[in-house]
Image (cartoon, grey):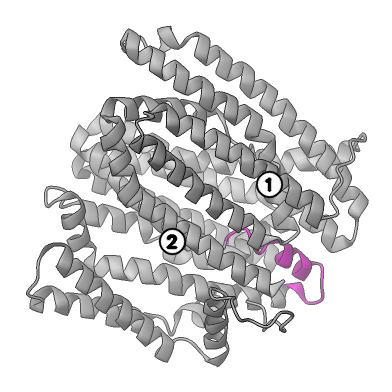
Amino acid sequence: MASQIRRGAVLSYATVAFNALTGLLYTPWMVSVIGNDYYGLYTLATSVINIFVMDFGLGDAVSRFLSKYYAEGDEQSANEFLGMVLRLYFGIAALLFVVLLVVYLNADAIYARLSAGQLIVFKRLFIVAALYSVVSFPLASLNGMLEANELFVKLNGCNLARRVLTVGLIVVSLVMGAGVYALVVINAAVGLVFGAVKIAIVRRDTGISPAFTRCGELRIREVLGFSAWTMVVQIAQRFIFALMPSIIAMVSNSKEIAVFGLASSLESYVWTVANALNGMFMPKVTRVLHGDSPEENIQALAVRVGRIQLLITGAIIVVFAAIGHDFITCWVGPEYDTLWLATLLLILPELVELPTMIEGTALVAVGRVKERGLAYIVMAATNLVLGYALSGPFGAVGACLAICVAYFVRTMGMCVFYDRFLGFKLSSFARDTYADWFVPAAMTVVAGLVLSHVLPLAGWSRFVVEAIVEATVYCASCWILTLDASNKERVARLFSNMMPIGRRRGAIDGPEV
């Protein structure tokens, strides 16, 4: 399965790169074509739906429990579990239909400030997006099934193909004058097509056969308990970025809200890139936990994956710290002079959080979701208190500082749980993962500072040259000073998977990540 993880990672990063590119280039073009008013109505329709539509922790439950049953060789329990989860998915979908129908029928009263024409457009967009959300909701379980069976190449391949096809069809439709309705219709149609593709993959490539028999009360309570605490985590995560604009509006002004919105958008791109590997290691972690010497093997796996995550996450954060101010000036103009610092505060915690991904996965695998939920509740509360206190005097920068502190509090709390329930040795992990990374990071920052004083260019040309030099310095210094022979071999194999043509069929895979 090492090849599945490596190739799946390549496809995942390709999807991330495409999403980032479309976010920076395609989205502004699309808004200019359909107009700000129509884009605002589209955003309103989808945001209202997103308030109610979440998987309530069932997606993580599918991946966790299927991986557990497969590691134990208990296929019957896996199929009975899937039957129960699918019934839950269909039940929740029915409730979502009722809730969204109520919103639709009361849209005139809820959005009384919209004009008659705007209400017509909103309701048409809303009904298409809502029906798609309800119909596709049970299909969310397919991702967990594919992850548990380690079919990462097909899963991530579907996700990339879906995104490319959706954007391509929308671009063609808008060029042909289709208007705003193309956004929801094409997204729904392509989503359902790839849902059908995933169903076909599950039926053909896995032994999954949901058994709709009566499950024991103990299993139902276990799954619902897991899902409930996972839902708490999801709500706490939404609490961070969804609530902060309202806090800023209470104590500051609209410009600071705009700065925060841009900073959170940039943070989401960084998070998506750095978090691309997440979800691929649940089956492997579960097998390690059911094998010999689980604590030692989890620690070793955590260091191997953590070093890779640090190299990727560190590259983005260090380069942004060095030349991000020039990027901000080129992207949105010098009037957003605080955006660089605000964004940096949002992404700094990822230097600690993402390299500990394996421990987080292991904590879920052993069922300690209550503890994780408690850490996220503390994070949300910290963010609320500090956000209100700091957003007034410092605006968006204060809001981002509150989130930064809240994230670090959460990560430190999680490390306490890793130590208590997994035997995680934090000092050993920090030494083995971070010690030889700081020199390349410092060299990259120094190179950026030197460039800022000697480079005689301006605008995008200046930023492009800076980015190339910074990336070269970081990659070269990490290759020489950070990566050992085995890690260099893994990197080489990862890039070789980007060019599979000519690779001998049936070749022996190298060591796992």
Mark with earlier residue (1, 2): 1
From the top left corner, tell me how far across and down residue 471 is, in percent: 32, 76
Position of the N terminus, as image quadrant, is bottom right
The kind of residue tagged 2 is Glu
Amino acid at circle 1: Val
Per the model, the C-alpha gap separating discs 1 and 2 is: 34 Å
Instruction: Residue 380 in the image: state x and y as whole percent.
Output: 46, 42
Secondary structure state at the residue bearing disc 2: helix
| Magenta residues (range) | 278-294
In-front residue for pair 462/382? 462
Q: Which residue is mark 2?
A: 350
Name the residue nearer the viewer: 134 or 314.
Answer: 134
Quadrant location of residue 436? bottom left
Taking the image as shown, residue 314 lies to the left or right of residue 464, namely right
Q: Which quarter of the picture shows residue 285?
A: bottom right
Residue with the mark numbered 1: 197
Q: Is residue 496 above or below residue 262?
A: below
Residue 102 in the magenta stretch? The answer is no
Residue at (33% x, 41% y) in the render: 387
Q: Is residue 441 left or right of residue 211?
A: left
Task: Find residue 62 and report its horizontal and vertical position in percent.
Answer: 73, 47
Does the rendering let one see residue 271?
no
Dot 2 crowding, Cα within 10 Å, few <14, some 14–19, many 20+: many
